[in-house]
């Protein structure tokens, strides 16, 4: 199939609508710290680890805090986030995502979840979607956050597939940069004005077919 062997999916904002809860939780923290945090600011937090997200948030607010204070704030944010997550139902799986993944698996392609989140096991269990993935690499398994390619390269390694045979589905600018740095084909999920560096962009997994991905995936392209 045109050299495509594996599909790597980001979690938050691609498979499930948790990106909004991350934003609500960070914004609540910013409110309490006394500054405004906008959706535009939030784009910089997508795909990056909790610690790095907090650093960016504090930069937006012009604040500099001790490591101890930062650890407390990161734990507080996660508490707010988990209060939302624990109430989630499979309805919050994004439209078309499950069907799309089963279509890939039925076509003999390997699938992986590639996320910076340390809460992925809980989310996969709550939504009963663990069987969709042959491999899961999350924030507990990697030390460098996107845009570093580590999470995607680890998926390729665990799947036993060359990076250039992988396609990545990502809603974050940092995630697209990580996919490109890994030498992979990238499909941006969301707004083309934001995901400019992606090879192609779709509004959601429900808005793109396996056939379109296979056609766009160009094995002749000189990726690393
Ligand atoms: C994903 C999200 C980020 C989030 C990160 C860590 O990459 O896009 O917004 O900060 O995971 O998530 P966690 O659940 O570990 O706080
Ligand atoms: Mg995401």
Image (cartoon, rainbow, N blue to C red):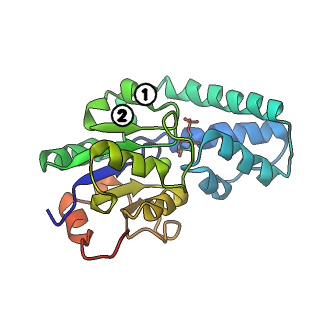
User: Is label 1 or label 2 in front?
Assistant: 1
**Residue at the image point whose x is 25% and y is 72% from the top:** 218
Residue 127 position (above or below residue 134): above
**Residue at the image point whose x is 40% and y is 46% from the top:** 154
User: Can residue 174 be seen?
Assistant: yes
Along the line of sight, which residue is nearer the eye, 110 or 45? Answer: 110
User: Can residue 129 be seen?
Assistant: no
**Residue at the image point whose x is 32% and y is 58% from the top:** 167
Local crowd size for mark 1, using a 10 Å CA cut-off: few (<14), some (14–19), many (≥20): few
Look at mark 1 in the image and give the residue it sits on: 121
Q: Position of residue 223 (x, y in %)?
A: 36, 71
Q: How many marks?
A: 2
CB atoms at circles 1 and 2 under 8 Å apart? no
Which of the two discs, 1 and 2, labels the residue nearer the N terminus? Answer: 2
Rounded to the nearest angstrom, the CA distance separating label 1 from label 2 is: 18 Å
Left or right: where does residue 211 sit relative to residue 188?
left
Look at mark 2 in the image and give the residue it sits on: 91
Ligand 1 occupies quarter: top right
Left or right: where does residue 224 sit relative to residue 138?
left
Q: Position of residue 85 (x, y in %)?
A: 51, 28
Along the line of sight, which residue is nearer the eye, 29 or 224? Answer: 224
For numbered disc 1, what is the local secondary structure? helix
Q: Position of residue 116 (x, y in %)?
A: 52, 42
Quarter where residue 187 is shown:
bottom left
């Amino acid at each position: 199939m045109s050299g495509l062997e594996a599909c790597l999916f980001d979690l938050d904002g691609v498979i499930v609508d948790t990106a909004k809860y991350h934003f609500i939780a960070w914004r609540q923290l910013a409110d309490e710290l006394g500054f405004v945090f906008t959706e535009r600011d939030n784009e910089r937090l997508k795909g990056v680890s909790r610690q790095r997200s907090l650093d960016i948030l504090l930069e937006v607010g012009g604040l500099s805090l001790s490591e101890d204070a930062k650890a407390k704030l990161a734990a507080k944010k996660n508490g707010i986030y988990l209060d939302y997550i624990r109430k989630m139902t499979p309805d919050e799986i994004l439209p078309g995502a499950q069907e799309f993944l089963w279509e890939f698996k039925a076509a003999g392609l390997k699938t992986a979840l590639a996320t910076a989140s340390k809460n992925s096991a809980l989310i996969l269990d709550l939504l009963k979607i663990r069987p969709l993935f042959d491999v899961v690499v999350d924030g507990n398994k990697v030390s460098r956050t996107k845009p570093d390619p580590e999470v995607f390269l680890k998926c390729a390694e665990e799947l036993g597939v060359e990076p250039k045979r992988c396609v990545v589905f990502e809603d974050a600018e940092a995630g697209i940069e990580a996919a490109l740095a890994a030498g992979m084909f990238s499909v941006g999920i969301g707004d083309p004005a934001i995901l400019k560096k992606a090879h192609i962009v779709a509004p959601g997994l429900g808005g793109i077919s396996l056939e379109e991905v296979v056609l766009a995936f160009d094995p002749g392209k000189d990726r690393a």
